[in-house]
Amino acid sequence: NAGVTQTPKFRILKIGQSMTLQCTQDMNHNYMYWYRQDPGMGLKLIYYSVGAGITDKGEVPNGYNVSRSTTEDFPLRLELAAPSQTSVYFCASSNLGYTFGSGTRLTVV
Amino acid sequence: AQSVTQPDIHITVSEGASLELRCNYSYGATPYLFWYVQSPGQGLQLLLKYFSGDTLVQGIKGFEAEFKRSQSSFNLRKPSVHWSDAAEYFCAVDLTNAGKSTFGDGTTLTVKP
């Protein structure tokens, strides 16, 4: 049982580049989330989804976009990478408690 | 908006000593309550959860938590800490059973030999 799978684990981007962080879950959870965690800080919600075709902004959505075409997948898109987006990104899904992926460590230089 | 407070940013305990991590929430109703642990370089893992019923809940890795409605608290405890318990601990609440939780800022636990 894989749970929540995130790819890639590490990535270095140049300013202005774009990329997609992939997230997939195999637990048939309706709720999915993207968080960022800066060093020594807690979690900040970027976007979330309550089901396929439905997404909503969290606390810090600027600079990001998401889509949810299937229950399993919830990719996060960075269109024009900026140094402020250097962070660790966690995807999660929930059903009476969250299951987190192992994270993507992104550096923008 | 629901608010979760973890008053202690950093706690240091000796191996074998008992542990209590504090969590308070600010809302009138009883939310769903959770504790998560994050080991260095890892994602968060669910330790335990409370929805209703018995106010003392048991979790994985020997942890337990007690819900106290009068104090709006859900403190995490462990009778004897092991060096492997050194990690970041997050309390979270879901007020509306909407599935989306609000997380506290976390408490870093250091374990002294």
Image (cartoon, rainbow, N blue to C red):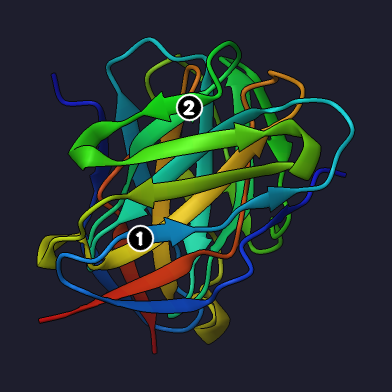
Residue A100 as seen in the image, left or right of residue A48: left
Judge whether B106 appears above or below A73 on screen.
Answer: below
Nearer-the-camera pick, B25 or A77:
B25
* Residue located at (76% from left, 44% from top): B71
Find numbered disc 2 in the image and state the secondary structure of the residue it sits on.
Answer: strand
- In primary-sequence order, the first of circles 1 and 2 is 1
The residue type indicated by label 1 comes to Leu
Placement of the N terminus of chain B among the 4 image quadrants:
top right
Tag 2 residue: B56
Find numbered disc 1 in the image and state the secondary structure of the residue it sits on.
Answer: strand
Nearer-the-camera pick, B100 or A21:
B100
Quarter-wise, where is residue B19 in the image? bottom left
**Chain to which the residue tagged by mark 1 belongs:** B
* Residue B45 placement (x, y as % from top left): 31, 42
The residue type indicated by label 2 comes to Leu
Q: Which mark is drawn over residue B19? A: 1
Residue B64 as seen in the image, left or right of residue B66: left
Q: Do pointers 1 and 2 mark residues of a single chain?
A: yes
